[in-house]
Image: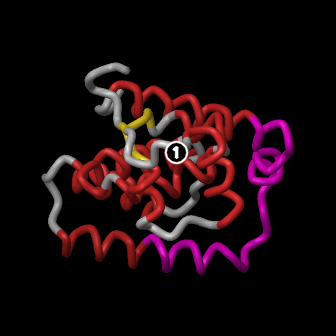
Amino acid sequence: MNTNEITVSLTEIRTQSPCIDGWRKVLAAKGPDIKAQFPLADIIETNDLDDALWTLRCRPEYSNLWRKYAVWCARQVEHLMTDERSKSALEVAWRYSEGSATDEELGAARDAAWDAAWGAAGAASSDAARAASSSAARAAAWDAQKQKLIEILNAGEWV
């Protein structure tokens, strides 16, 4: 194990009340020593990206790193964002993860982005938005998100 990589134990996962199917998969792959630490990135392989993302809650001490990852994911589709409030929210969230934006700034940016999203929900979708929702584009985005999370978990820091 890399000394910086982010690890977790089955005990820590269990305290967060995982879904039954996800729990069975990781338990089968990582049991029976429920207290042993293992690389959190392994959950992507034993389960899937959704379960690995859910498991991040076991490591709240890395919340700023998780926020950076979420912003990175959103920036992959930023070109589809037509409202500046959404783009601004990404910048505020990134600054917040680095300690340079306040809770109030983050809340205001989140509210503005929410308003922008609900305002756009009724608008007709553009050709770019339809293209981005294709199966191939979704699969590529999912793979990029998976690879980025593996890099972060293995490094134990933003990469």
From the viewer's perspective, tell me whether residue 127 is left or right of residue 84: right
- Residue at the spot 45% in from the left edge and 48% down from the top edge: 34
Residue 33 in the image: state x and y as whole percent: 46, 43
Residue at the disc numbered 1: 73
Q: Main secondary structure of the magenta part?
A: helix
144 to 129, vertically: above or below: above
- Residue at the spot 40% in from the left edge and 75% down from the top edge: 112
Residue 98 in the image: state x and y as whole percent: 19, 47
Q: Nearer the viewer, residue 66 or 80?
A: 66
Residue 123 among those drawn in magenta = yes
From the viewer's perspective, tell me whether residue 128 is left or right of residue 17: right
Q: In the orientation shown, which residue stands out farthest toward the front?
A: 32
The amino acid marked with disc number 1 is Cys
Q: Nearer the viewer, residue 25 or 116?
A: 25
Residue 28 in the image: state x and y as whole percent: 66, 44
92 to 73, vertically: above or below: below
- Where is residue 102, by image quadrant? bottom left
Quarter of the image that includes the N terminus: top left
The mark tally for this picture is 1
Q: Which residues are magenta?
A: 113-139
Residue 69 among those drawn in magenta = no
Q: Nearer the viewer, residue 17 or 115?
A: 17
Quarter of the image that includes the C terminus: top left
Residue 150 in the image: state x and y as whole percent: 50, 30
